Amino acid sequence: MSKKAVCLISGGLDSCVTAHISKKQGFDIFALTFIYGQKHKKEIESAKKIAISLNAKNHILSNIDLSKFRGSSLTDKSLKPEKNHNLDEIGKKIPSTYVPARNIIFLSIALSYAESINADSIYIGVTATDYSGYPDCRPEFIKAFQKLANIGTKIGLEGNKIKIRTPLLKMNKSSIIKKGLALKAPLESTWSCYYGKSKACGRCDSCQLRLKGFKELGIKDPIKYESLPDWYLKN
C-alpha cells in the first residue's frame, strides 16, 4: 500500500527540495499551495511547475486572503520588503516579511487535508538556520504543532498520527541546494524573491540568502537577477 504525503509547496527553493525529499522517500505526493494575498503570483506559477516535476497525485491551490490583515510587507500594499541588508543582519530580528501566524494557518489546513485522504505525513520546508527571525520556523513551534495534531484529530486519537516532517529544519541554504541538486529537483523553476518582476531583485533577504548558498557551493544560480550585491561579486 502506497504512503501519502501532503507537501506544502510555495514555489520557493526550500519547499521544492522538501517535496522532492518526500518523493525520494517513497511517498505519493499531494501538493498544497496557498494563494494568501501575496502581492505577486510568480511563486504560484513556480509551485505548479514543481508539482508537475513531482508527478503529484493532486495539486490544490487554496485561496485564503490574508491581505485583509495588515502588518506584513508580503501582503500589505503600504509596505515593501527590505533590501540591501548586510548578511549578518538577516535573521536577527523578526522581519517585515513575517505574515502573522501564517504557518499555523497553513499547517492547520494541511492537517485537515491529510486527515481527509488518510495521509501519513505533512512535509513543510521550514528552516531555522537561515531565518531564525521567524517564530513559526523554529523547532519549538513544529514540536508544539505536532502535539496539537496528535490530540486534535480523529486519526490522532485512534493512534494513526500524522507526522509533521521538516527535513530542512537544521540545514543552511548551501546544504539545501546541494541536496536539491542531488535529487535533481528543478531549482531553475523555483522563485525565492519577494518581488514579482521578470527577474529576481538580488537584493531582498531571500535573494541574498539564496545567492549566498550557491556562492558557497561555487555554483551559479540558474535563475536570472536584476542586480547582484557587492559581496557576491567579490572573489
Image (cartoon, rainbow, N blue to C red):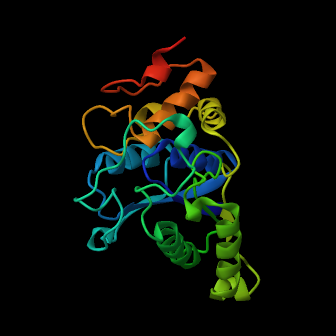
Query: Which residue is at a point 49% across and 47% down the rendered structure image?
Result: 55
Q: Which residue is drawn at 55% across and 26% down?
A: 214
- In this view, the residue in front, 68 or 47, is 68
Work out whether residue 120 can be spotted: no
- Residue 199 appears at what percent x and percent y? 29, 31
Query: In the picture, which quadrant includes the C terminus?
Result: top right
Side of 158 relative to 174 (left or right) = right
Query: Is residue 11 depicted above or below 198 in this figure?
Result: below
Which of the 4 quarters of the picture holds residue 46? top left
The N terminus lies in which quarter of the figure?
A: bottom right
Horizontal arrangement in the rendering, residue 156 relative to residue 132 (left or right): right
Residue 185 versus residue 135 in the image, above or below: above
Compared to 229, does 201 lie above or below?
below
Looking at the image, which is closer to me, 3 or 211?
211
Q: Which residue is drawn at 33% across and 70% down?
A: 66
**Left or right for 6, reference 65:** right
Considering every residue shown, the one lying at the far right of the view is 159
Q: Is residue 212 visible?
A: yes
Q: In which quarter of the image is residue 154?
A: bottom right
Image location (x, y in percent) of residue 54: 51, 46
Q: Please provide percent x and percent y for residue 32.
A: 45, 61
Task: Give the image quarter of residue 165.
Answer: bottom right
Name the residue nearer the viewer: 7 or 223. 223
Q: Position of residue 143 (x, y in %)?
A: 71, 70
Q: How many numbered circles does the render carry?
A: 0
The answer to whether residue 169 is above or below residue 184 is: below
**At 59% across and 17% down in the image, what residue appears?**
218
